[in-house]
Image (spheres, rainbow, N blue to C red):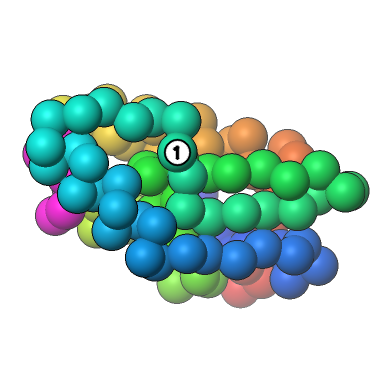
Amino acid sequence: MSGEYLRNPKLVWRDEPERREEILATLGKGVEDEESGWVIVVDGGDIHQLNLIAGDIWMLCDGTRDEGSIAAELIKTYDVDPTMLAVDVTSFVRDCLEKGWLIRKDT
């Protein structure tokens, strides 16, 4: 898949940057917390909480980046295997496209 990705403007969502900082502080203490999220997406009355990485990917889907540039931006922040991060980005983007949460930017 290629193209730049944009959050669907028909979705209701919000981010909670202070919650993101709390999650990072917890991780900094060596405590894993993959269930906590900092971005909330409302879809058809269902509330979805995106975990740390998913929330970061979501925020980078602003219509200016493709999957590769999203992964390149995240690798600056996280000490993870770049190949695995690229797989995670691709998986998240595909899932969000299928759900209608993300759209490809018109070129």
Amino acid identity at mark 1: Ser
Q: Residue at x 38, y 44 (%)?
A: 52
Identity of the residue drawn at 26% across and 27% down: 32
Q: Residue at x 20, y 38 (%)?
A: 27
Residue 71 visible, this angle: no
Q: Is residue 74 visible?
A: yes
Q: Position of residue 105 (x, y in %)?
A: 62, 67
Specify the principal SS of the magenta part.
loop
Q: Quadrant of residue 20?
A: bottom left
Q: Is residue 36 above or below residue 20?
A: above
Question: Residue 4 location in percent, x, y?
Answer: 51, 62
In the picture shown, does residue 40 fall above or below 88?
Answer: below
**Where is residue 42 shown, x and y percent of the image?**
75, 53
Observer-nearest residue: 84 or 11? Answer: 11
Magenta-colored stretch includes residue 78: yes
Residue 27, compared with residue 104, is above or below; it is: above
Q: Quadrant of the C terminus?
A: bottom right
Quick check: 19 left or right of 5?
Answer: left
Which of the 4 image quarters holds residue 95?
top right
Q: Secondary structure at mark 1?
A: loop
- Residue 12 located left or right of residue 5: right
Task: Please provide the residue range marked out in magenta.
Answer: 75-80
Q: Is 96 a magenta residue?
A: no
Mark 1 sits on what residue? Answer: 36
